[in-house]
C-alpha cells in the first residue's frame, strides 16, 4: 500500500480536527464525508485509523472521562476532610477541563442517541454519584450546609464547573488556577460579602 | 384549499414538537423531512405555518429570550439594592427556565452557524452585560466580593443557573421556588457552613 491520502495525520491530530468539527457543527450533523473534506484526505485514509465516526466519539469522550475519573479516584482516596477533598475534586476537574477543553466540551454535549453516547452518560452519572457521596460526607462532618439535598448541591457545584466550557478560552484569559480560585470562592463561600 | 395534512396542529403545538426534536437530535441534524414524519403531516402542511426550519428556531429562541429580557428589564428598573435586584434576576430567570424549559434548552445550545443563531447569541451577550452591570453596582454598594472580575462573577452565577437545563425536570422534582432557593443559597452564600 502507498501512503497517499494520509499526509501528516496520526490518530492524535485526526482526533483533534474531528472533535473541533463535532463541537462546531454537532456530532450528529457531521458526516465522515465532511470530516474527510476538512482534513483534505480520503475517507479510507480516515478508516485506516478508526473503524467509524462512533469510534472517534468514543476516543474523544474517554479522553475527558479518564482525566475526570483519575482526579475523582485521588479525591476519594486521599486523607483529609471531605470538604477539602471536594475542593480538590473541583480544582482537579477544572484543570482537566482547561487542558482537554474540546474533549470535555464534546462529552458535556452528548445526548444519548447511540451506544457510545449512552456509555458516556453512564460514566457521567457514576462521576456525579462520587461527588454526591463527598458532599454527604462533608455534611456529616459539619462543613457543608444541610438545608439543600446533597445531590442538588453536587449538581449545582458541577453545573458551575461544567458551565465554564461555554465561555472559558485558555488563551489570554485566566489561568486554570485563577479560574479554580474564582469558582471555589463563589461556590464554597458565596459571592455575597460577609 | 382543503385542510388535509394539518390534523390538529396549530403553530404552538407544531413548535412544541419541533423544539423537542431539535433538543433530542440537534438543530442542525434535524431535517424538515424528519419533523414532518414525527408530526405525521406533510412538509407543505408545516410550511403553511412557517417559512423555514430557521423560522421555527427563531420563534423558539425568542420565546426564551423574551422571557429572560422581560425579567432583566424589571430587575434593572425596580428600586432597591443591586444585590437584591441581582437575586430578583436570578430567581426570575429560573422561573422562565422552568416554565419554558425546552425553549431555554434550545437557546443555550445554539452555536452560531446561521443568521438566526448569531442573532440569538448577540441577545445572549446583551443579557450577560446586564448581569455584569448589576454585579458591578452591587460591588460598588459593598455587597458583592471584589476579588473576582465582575464579568467572571456574572458568568459563574448564570453558568450555575443555565446548568439547570442539564438535569432539572419539573415533574416530581423541586418546584421553581425551591430550585431558586437552592441556587441562591449556594451562589450568594456558598455551600460551606459559616
Image (cartoon, coloured by chain):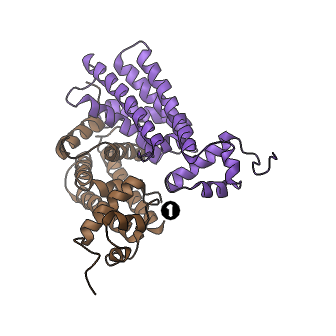
Chain colours: A brown, B purple
Q: Quadrant of the C terminus of chain B?
A: top left
Residue B49, position as x, y percentages in the image: 67, 42
Residue A103, position as x, y percentages in the image: 31, 58
Q: Quadrant of the N terminus of chain B?
A: top right
Badge 1 marks a residue whose secondary structure is loop
Q: Tell me the crowding category of disc 1: few under 14, some 14 to 19, or many 20 or more residues within 10 angstroms, Cα based.
A: few
Residue B180, position as x, y percentages in the image: 45, 33
How many numbered dots are placed on residues in this image?
A: 1
Residue B188 relative to residue A84: left or right: right
Question: Can residue A63 be seen by looking at this rendering?
Answer: no
Question: Can residue B11 be seen by looking at this rendering?
Answer: yes
Frontmost residue, B125 versus A123: B125
Picture residue at 32% right of the left edge, 51% below the top: A134
Q: Which residue is mark 1?
A: A113
Residue B153, position as x, y percentages in the image: 29, 32
Q: Which residue ends up furthest to the right in the rendered image?
A: B2
Residue A105 relative to residue B119: left or right: left
Image height check: is B166 above or below A49? above
Q: Which residue ends up furthest to the top in the rendered image?
A: B79
Amino acid at each position: 500500500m502507498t501512503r497517499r491520502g494520509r499526509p501528516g495525520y496520526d490518530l492524535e491530530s485526526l482526533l483533534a480536527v474531528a472533535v473541533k468539527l463535532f463541537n462546531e457543527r454537532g456530532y450528529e450533523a457531521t458526516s465522515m464525508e465532511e470530516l474527510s473534506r476538512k482534513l483534505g484526505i480520503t475517507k479510507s485514509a480516515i478508516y485506516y485509523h478508526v473503524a467509524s465516526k462512533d469510534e472517534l466519539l468514543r476516543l474523544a469522550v474517554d479522553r475527558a472521562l479518564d482525566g475526570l475519573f483519575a482526579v475523582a479516584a485521588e479525591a476519594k482516596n486521599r486523607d483529609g476532610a471531605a470538604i477539602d477533598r471536594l475542593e480538590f475534586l473541583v480544582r482537579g476537574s477544572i484543570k482537566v477541563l482547561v487542558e482537554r477543553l474540546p474533549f470535555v466540551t464534546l462529552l458535556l454535549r452528548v445526548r444519548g442517541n447511540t451506544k457510545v453516547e449512552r456509555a458516556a452518560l453512564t460514566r457521567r452519572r457514576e462521576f456525579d454519584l462520587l461527588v454526591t457521596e463527598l458532599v454527604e460526607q462533608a455534611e456529616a462532618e459539619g462543613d457543608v450546609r444541610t438545608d439543600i439535598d446533597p445531590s442538588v448541591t453536587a449538581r449545582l457545584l458541577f453545573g458551575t464547573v461544567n458551565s465554564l466550557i461555554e465561555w472559558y478560552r485558555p488563551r489570554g484569559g485566566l489561568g486554570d488556577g485563577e479560574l479554580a480560585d474564582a469558582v471555589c470562592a463563589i461556590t464554597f463561600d458565596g459571592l455575597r460579602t460577609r
